[in-house]
Every structure is written in C-alpha cells, then in structure tokens.
Image (cartoon, grey):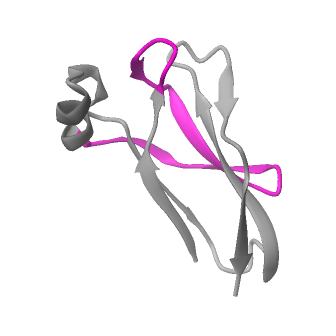
Amino acid sequence: MLKATGWAVDEQRESAAADVDVVVDQTPFPSGYGADRHDVAEYFKRPAYGTIGFEAEIRSGTIPKGPHTLSLRVVSSGGTCYYETPAIAVVID
C-alpha cells in the first residue's frame, strides 16, 4: 500500500483548501482532507490552518511496480480551481 500524509493550504487565500488529491502518473487519487494539524496553525499563527491535514491510501496492485511520478493537487478553498505541485520521482517496490 502507498500511503501519503501531510498538510496543504490554499496559499493564495491563506485558508484551508477544499480538498487534496495525490496524483500518480497524472491519475488523481482522493485523500481524506481535514485532519487536525493545530501544530501547523500554531507555527504559522493562522487558526484557519487547524484542520488542513490529509491522508491518502492507494491499494497495493493499483500502481504497478517500478518508477512513477507523484504530485499533490490542492483544490482552492472556493473549489473553483486547483494548484498542482511539481512532480517527484518515486519507485514502487
């Protein structure tokens, strides 16, 4: 299983995002978004960042073994657009 966890915000609006997808080889996989990340909110001194954590689990066999690219798609707080991070190289064993 591939598990991706972290946090993401709508930087332009300085607020929580609407959603986050983990994108593998240009295929989006949904995450659970809205997990407690009060540590991030305290660090940035932005209470709106209190529930910006995400977790995605992609089942084994969904992605074949070998090299792939992985990025995050962060949906804006208004849900009208998204920002995709630069892809990084990953290898599935």
Observer-nearest residue: 76 or 30? Answer: 76
Q: Quadrant of the N terminus?
A: bottom right
Residue 92 in which image quadrant: bottom right
Is 77 left or right of 52, judged from the image as shown?
A: right
Estimate the x, y position of residue 68 in percent, counting from the top left: 79, 67
| Viewer-side residue, 85 vs 79 | 85
Stretch of the chain drawn in magenta: 10-37
Q: How many marks?
A: 0
Residue 24 counted in the magenta span: yes
Q: What residue lies at 52% left-to-right and 14% top-to-bottom?
A: 12
- Reply above or below: 16 against 25: above
Q: Is residue 42 above or below residue 54?
A: above
Question: In which quadrant of the rendered image does the C terminus lie?
Answer: bottom right
Residue 45 position in % (x across, y down):
20, 24
Against 25, residue 34 (above or below) is: above
Was residue 36 drawn as part of the magenta stretch in this picture? yes
Q: Position of residue 70 (x, y in %)?
A: 70, 57
Toward the bottom, the furthest residue is 93
Residue at 26% x, 38% y is: 40
Residue depicted at x 28% and y 21%: 48
SS majority, magenta: strand
